[in-house]
Image (cartoon, rainbow, N blue to C red):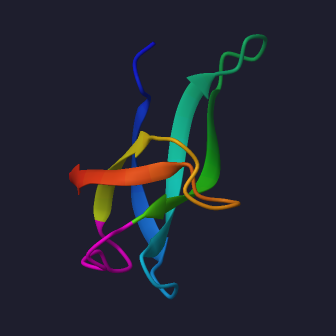
Amino acid sequence: MPKRILQGVVTSDKNEQTITVLVERRFKHPLLQKTVRKSKKYRAHDEANKFKVGDTVRIEECAPISKTKRWTVVVEA
């Protein structure tokens, strides 16, 4: 099964080797046919601490690194 890759914006880089990424998805509401925006935050592993708040990044699913981290940064988008 392929690993999921998501794109989002870094909202926090305060922790060592960890960034928080806000991923937004858009879809049409099944009944109202209106475009709905939903967002979710993911914690991702940033080995080199090179990403800062506001950067657009791609994250990839991986094996659990800690209690909350299940994603790693692939590359800056």
Q: Residue at x 29, y 74 (%)?
A: 51
Q: Where is residue 9 shown, x and y percent of the image? A: 40, 61
> Would you say residue 10 sits in the magenta stretch?
no
Q: Where is residue 19 shown, x and y percent of the image? A: 46, 71
Q: How many marks?
A: 0
Query: Most prominent secondary structure in the magenta stretch?
Result: loop
Q: Is 24 situated above or below 27?
A: below
Q: Residue at x 31, y 79 (%)?
A: 49
Q: Residue at x 55, y 57 (%)?
A: 65
Q: Nearer the viewer, residue 40 or 49?
A: 49
Q: Where is residue 7 shown, x and y percent of the image? A: 37, 45
Q: Is 30 situated above or below 17?
A: above
Q: Quadrant of the N terminus?
A: top left
* Residue 42 relative to residue 57: left or right: right
Magenta region: which residues? 46-55
Q: Where is residue 31 shown, x and y percent of the image? A: 78, 11
